[in-house]
Amino acid sequence: MTSYRNFGVVGGGAWGTALAQLLAADGAPVRLWVREEDVVAAINADHRNPVFLPGAALSASLTATSALTDMAACDALLVVVPVPFLRAVLAELPAGDAPLIFCSKGMEAGSFAFPIDMARELAPQRPHAVLSGPTFAHEVAAGLPTAITLAAADRDLAAAIAGAIARPHFRPYVSTDVIGAEIGGAIKNILAIACGIVDGAGLGLNARAALISRGFAEMTRFGLARGAQAETLAGLAGLGDLVLTCTSSNSRNFTLGQGLGRGEDAETLMADRRTVAEGAFSAPVIAAAARADGIDMPICDTVARLVAGETRVADAIQALLSRPLRSEGR
């Protein structure tokens, strides 16, 4: 079994920085690619990422670069680039056969491609895996206990990567269900926006619990229709991540929803953010994919229309509550 020791992380946002710190905390050399030159300078000089992960002390063995060519020497790459920008970054990666482990969550507009689909197109010579589950970046960087899913079609590859990134406080569970891991991660962000709307609109905890449950039904319908395994969707990468992001203001998607629930303008809310609420990009894409496949996803569709400014929160809530009664299993 291949052993991976020289990791690189592509993407210097909060999650990419936290993963780099996780791997570098024991003094192992880790290279982090960051687009922003000011962030590169801060990481290398002060061992801090003041823009995306303020407050986290970074290991001296973690070095940042803005040159993708510097990642060529790494024997495995964790890719943490937001999905709307992922295709361009993959096209610029230096040639090589190091595995790509995708840690971004979402689906590409137009193509309906998940990150691993883009990799199969643009880097077919590389092995591919997905890392997804209930994680807040600042907790991982601080060494707090975390469990997560590491999925790859090749179980041996998944096991090798899981063994290489595992730490006493960071426990990867191996899966071969790449589709389920990607779908769970994409849809939970949309549902977190919806739960934030419920909170911001003051609709109560009963409503939030109902939304999480019915949202999970939507995730399951979409996932099973696309070949995901039910146990994956009910595990860390699906239900686990859904519960985390739908119940905490530490989630960027939840806080975006809170603003929408208070009546704030979606365009203004997103323009004020340097960090990405991935659900805002995923909602219209997942909703369009569901419509194309004939899958009923009213919550995700409603979030897509709210983010686009096509409906008001009060009207959206009324529309959801007035839907015909149905059996719970549907």
Image: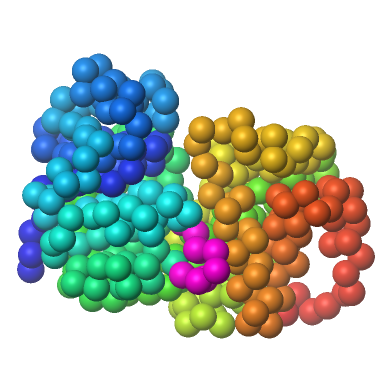
Q: Where is residue 134 in the image (x, y as percent from the top left)?
A: 45, 50
Above-or-below relation of 12 to 296 = above
Is residue 150 at all visible to an observer of this figure?
A: no
Query: What residue is shown at x 29% (from left), y 21% (from top)?
Result: 42
Is residue 201 rendered to the left or right of residue 21?
Answer: right
Is residue 179 rendered to the left or right of residue 47?
Answer: right
What stretch of residues is rendered in magenta? 104-113
Is residue 110 one of those drawn in magenta?
A: yes
Q: Which of 330 and 252 is in front in this view?
A: 252
Query: What residue is shown at x 25% (from left), y 36% (from top)?
Result: 66
Query: What residue is shown at x 45% (from left), y 40% (from top)?
Result: 136
Above-or-below relation of 260 to 210 = above
Q: Where is residue 203 in the image (x, y as percent from the top left)?
A: 83, 44
Q: Where is residue 238 in the image (x, y as percent from the top left)?
A: 50, 62
Q: Which of 92 and 203 is in front in this view?
A: 92
Is residue 132 at all visible to an observer of this figure?
A: yes
Is residue 157 rendered to the left or right of residue 225?
Answer: left
